[in-house]
Image: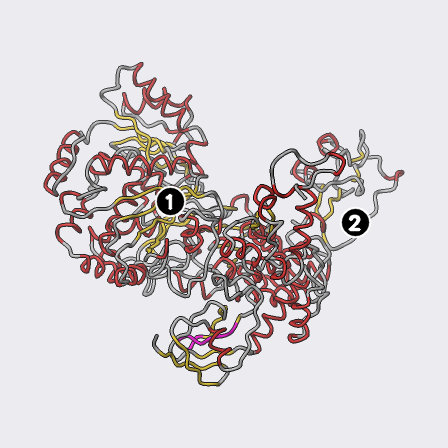
Amino acid sequence: MTRLSSPEKLECARKEIVAKIDPSKPCISVCAGAGCLASGAAEVIAAFKTELEFHGLTTEVNTRGTGCPGFCERGPIVMIYPGEICYLQVKPADVPEIVSHTIKEKKVVERLLYVNPATGEKVTRESEIPFYKNQQRNILSENIRLDSKSIDDYLAIGGYSALSKVLFQMKPEDVMGEIKKSNLRGRGGGGFPAWRKWEESRNAPDPIKYVIVNADEGDPGAFMDRALIEGNPHSILEGLIIGAYAVGAHEGFIYVRQEYPLAVVNINLAIRQAAERGLVGKDILGSGFDFTVKVHMGAGAFVCGESSALMTALEGRAGEPRPKYIHTAVKGVWDHPSVLNNVETWANVPQIINKGADWFTQYGTEGSKGTKIFSLVGKISNTGLVEVPMGVTLREIIEKIGGGIPGGKKFKAVQTGGPSGGCIPEAQLDLVVDFDQLTKAGSMMGSGGMIVMDEDTCMVDIARYFIDFLKDESCGKCTPCREGIRQMLRVLTNITTGKGKEGDIELLEELAESMGAALCALGKSAPNPVLSTIRYFRDEYEAHIRQQRCPALACKEMIAFHIDPAKCKACGTCFKQCPAEAIEGGKKRIHVIDQEKCTKCGTCFDVCPKQFGAVGKISGEPVPPPVPEEKRAL
Amino acid sequence: MSEIHLQIDGKDVVASEGMTLVDAAKSVGITIPTLCHHEKLEPYGGCRICTVEVEVRGWPKLVAGCIYPVEKDLVVRTRSEKVDKVRKVLVEEMLAHAPDSEQLKVLAEEYGADKDRFDKHPSFCIHCGLCVRYCAEIKKKHAVGFVDRGSNREISFFPEIAGKECWDCKECFPLCPTSALQAAYVLAESLMSPPEEAGGCGCSCSGHKK
């Protein structure tokens, strides 16, 4: 592969690549992101290759595995160009029909299209599916346009033009100015303005500086960084090199968790390809600017997403946070100035350079500019990655894009910001989503996890879940975090198992206050899931403590299953399926649950035929006595 | 070194650059309690008992006095209501591990901490890391370290190193504020020592020559 030794050569190479692309030539793009691969995308791609070969179409049709377009709920996703036909949940068995119908006869396979549940209408084009239509996909939209393993694909869509522009038309101060003007804020959690970190590092006298990508995504339910680094690794790399040029760094690191094997493979491949083309390494594009980058695999500790812990881990030591009274931008890895930004933050950089800060700031609110990617998960119809401009409301995301709550259930809360965030209730659904508003509501933007919960979710149990997660994920170095989490978990476990007592809520609040003295942001923000649920769902805490009742009927130790004798038709379904053999039944005899034997698995509740609805869940009240023997005959 | 003027508990203090709040307070006779702090060791900031309240650009925040560097015009409160409340909970949490520690008892008295507030967790260790850091930084032996993380974090002697190094050293013993170290060490020793009748482990390790 030829090294591109000048910006002109880069443009020539790009022209050559683009010239080879025939826009009218059919292209089958299959999402090859981790989610779709798990649902069989690799088999679908293989089936397309075999089928095209069978029809002798190998040279006339392109097939490629792309990055994740976001609609993970309906994977594997297949897009057919030109025409942008979008097929969902495609199986290898569907492939012959797609090739014979869509590729050969230019007809649409109706049964694989998206059906709008509201109208029953079928939607052919991706951009018309409500899930996508209501998004603003500045960053994510590139994923489906390119083969994640091909630098040529990235060059074809204008890749590395921002780097070339920066190196030959802008001084580092100009780059700083543009980023400052864009007011790009860190997408990893705190929302700290990127330019401030950059400027602090740039102004630090130490000549050795580092730039780092934080790809240690670890919030439960969050996967936007994975999709970016797997799907479009070159964009992250390009952003990083631009950052390095601006702050005067010549070395960089990409800290990616090893649980993201495909991301590790794709980013390493991207670096190798970029090095072969002279886009990373010595004398980039003949500009005289040198930059090398190493991939560092994280060992899986959640706390390593915290900047100082990540840097300690980069140095080869156990990933523990250290005091940051002097910013890591001044004294970071091996005490050298180090700029650490999240994957999504870096991915924004090339676009800001190419399209300008004014383009970027047209999206968003006063204090939060641009778009943000969320991973919308939980009790929501359309699970997946969602990119929206800052400033849309939670309601728009959940109802318009997410398609609301499935199964006719009622919305209860949305959890944002992972273990450092909080739960936001229905009354606040019209809150606009930006860094400052979410913090005001007692939650936070975090890296973009958004977990939707319905009426069946117990909010005390959710708080307990997050604290239990942190019990193992705190590094354990400082007392308020380690011990505070331990004690909080004990209190929350008591409450959710019916052993709560008066004063527990106040104790949780007191522990939360002491955790304000923790060493790092993980510990300081660890009480947020507890405090926000107390703030908005105090009645649920009180019901658990005072009435031994779980209003959501979710806490196993506080509920009982009961068969309503008036409704039971003695069909035997629950009797046969109870794994604990806790149901006493018989032909034409009203069934009865033996409460001693019942393990509260809920099987009887789930299998009781809908038309009978005889099995009920109760909490906070005594179980009615079983029907007397003589009255059990139907 | 340039002079830095700041205010601690209403007193004007002149400190030199690089000093911590604990040092600066000490210079005017104000004691900020510490547990994991040690003059010979790198600042650690683990136990947080030295938590104080500072005002940065008008915003109060809690920081660790043993590592926070003095800043010009900083306002520091070492005994605000908030600070005392935090210290009380921290002492109570540590007492759940080491109820008999003399140092903790003194602190409990000072801050009105109830040693029975939280259920006992008899590990005896409060994770101050003095033994671990002393062994690593001063002795450069790394015979004792932290294992696991979060609530499961504990100190552990590594038999391969401890067997060779610890018998003639034991300098970390008196540093331990809870006597946890002895417990851990005794445990490690019992694990390492061969049964008497076996007559040594047959290796040349110094630990078994006694």
> In the picture provided, is A623 more to the left or to the right than B117?
right
Q: Quadrant of residue A627?
A: top right
Residue of label 1: A130
**Is B55 a magenta residue?**
yes
Residue of label 2: A623
Query: Can you give x and y, in whole percent of width and height, for residue A171 in the image?
Result: 16, 57
Q: Quadrant of residue A356?
A: bottom left
Region rendered in magenta: B52-59
Look at the image and tell me whether residue A550 can be seen: no
Look at the image and tell me whether residue A92 can be seen: yes
Q: Classify A57 as above or below A111.
A: above
**Is A303 a magenta residue?**
no
Q: Residues within 10 Å of mark 2 (few under 14, many from 20)?
A: some
At a point 73% along the width and 65% down the height, the residue shown is B116
> In the picture provided, is A604 more to the left or to the right than A35?
right
Instruction: Give, as a three-letter code, the residue at label 2.
Output: Val
Q: Main secondary structure of the magenta part?
A: strand
At a point 41% along the width and 66% down the height, the residue shown is A325
Q: Residue furthest front?
A: B210
Placement of the C terminus of chain A among the 4 image quadrants: top right
- Are dots 1 and 2 on a single chain? yes
Is disc 1 placed on a helix, strand or loop?
A: helix
Q: Classify A183 as above or below A65.
A: below
Q: Which chain letter goes with mark 2?
A: A
Residue nearest the viewer, comparing A515 with B67: B67
> In the picture provided, is B113 more to the left or to the right than A188?
right
